[in-house]
Amino acid sequence: MTSNTAVRPPPSETSGSDFARLSRKIAEAGLMGRRPSYYALRITMVAGLYVGGWAAVALIGDSWWTLAVAGFLAVVFGQVALLAHDAAHRQVFRRRRASEVSGRIAGAGIGMGYGWWQDKHTRHHANPNHEELDPDLDPDLLVWSQDQARAAKGLPRLIGRWQAFLFFPLLTLEGFNLHVSSVKALANRSLKNRALDGALLFAHFAVYLTAVLWLLPPGMAIAFLVVHQCLFGVYLGSLFAPNHKGMPILKGKDRPDFLRRQVLTSRNVRGGRLTDIALGGLNHQIEHHLFPSMPSPNLRRARTIVRRHCEDLGVDYVETGLITSYRLALASLHEAGAPLRNARVRA
């Protein structure tokens, strides 16, 4: 299991390679340097919103207006998840220890098992959109290719027919899935620091449920939990859906060089500073995959360099608007489920 998610290509892939030349341009532009002031401000603001949200629940108390606060906290939880992501990639701190401590604290704040997520995300970065190697393409609920559709059984076979229409409704379960997957991963003996992850997870659940049930009457507490976790899931899923879904899927021995493996399977989302804030810099997905440890505020500047480099090489650099990215992702899901719909028609 890889110990941190800042995936680096092997020297054999970068020495004198297309990526090596790009990497030198990025280094000369100073874009790999830390941004301590930016992250100090961002962490302070997100922590303040987190504490303020729970203070609002306590102040409003027995009122259905607390459901509006639940929606607000869903967004805040998503922003905490983005900070955990940046910390795991060593964007915030250069040293592993500081990165792991900060990542675990952020993960504990939203009920996410840091070790489980870090291992999964590391494998995704190493082989993005590879059907056999990218854990994000596991057909555990949805099918991502027609080959997976033909082999599907159980829920994926049932859902796969109409998965494009069900995708966003299913995202309401993503927050719950994050918690359940984190707990299930504790049974994996190869997972490092699983005792610590388990303690932090169950501490989160205990504090979260105690606070909600103590501050709100039972019926309202359940409504708060459902609204909060469902909207958190939708936001979380919406952060990652535009990045790779609908882009080429690699199979078998398909393994281009590092630069092409990252660029050709990723999609950028156009937008301004508000898009950067809402998507946590993941709208610059191509640059992030090429330079995972680059601080997220530097990704926008890196975009110009990377795009020009790809144009010089004749490598497709895909960038769309946010709505278009979702449309392409849904179209890809619909196409992947075609064998299941055709089989039903023939039957």
Image (cartoon, rainbow, N blue to C red):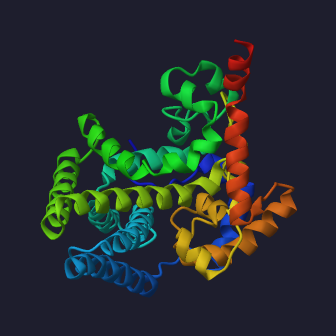
Say which residue appears at 62% left-offset and 26% top-offset.
148
Q: For residue 246, say whether it is visible.
A: no
The front one of 324 and 79 is 324
Say which residue appears at 17% left-offset and 46% top-offset.
195
- x and y percent of residue 341 in the render? 70, 25
Up-down relation of residue 74 to residue 147 (above or below)? below
Up-down relation of residue 295 to residue 169 (above or below)? below
- x and y percent of residue 169 in the render? 52, 49
Give the image quarter of residue 279: bottom right
Up-down relation of residue 208 to residue 245 (above or below)? below
The front one of 314 and 222 is 222
Left or right for 130, reference 179: right
Q: In which quarter of the image is the C terminus?
A: top right
Left or right for 2, reference 111: right
Give the image quarter of residue 205: bottom left
Say which residue appears at 56% left-offset and 51% top-offset.
168
Up-down relation of residue 145 to residue 200 (above or below)? above
Say which residue appears at 75% left-offset and 56% top-offset.
18
Q: Quadrant of the N terminus?
A: top left
Q: For residue 191, say whether it is visible.
A: yes
The front one of 337 and 132 is 337
- x and y percent of residue 35 in the render? 47, 82
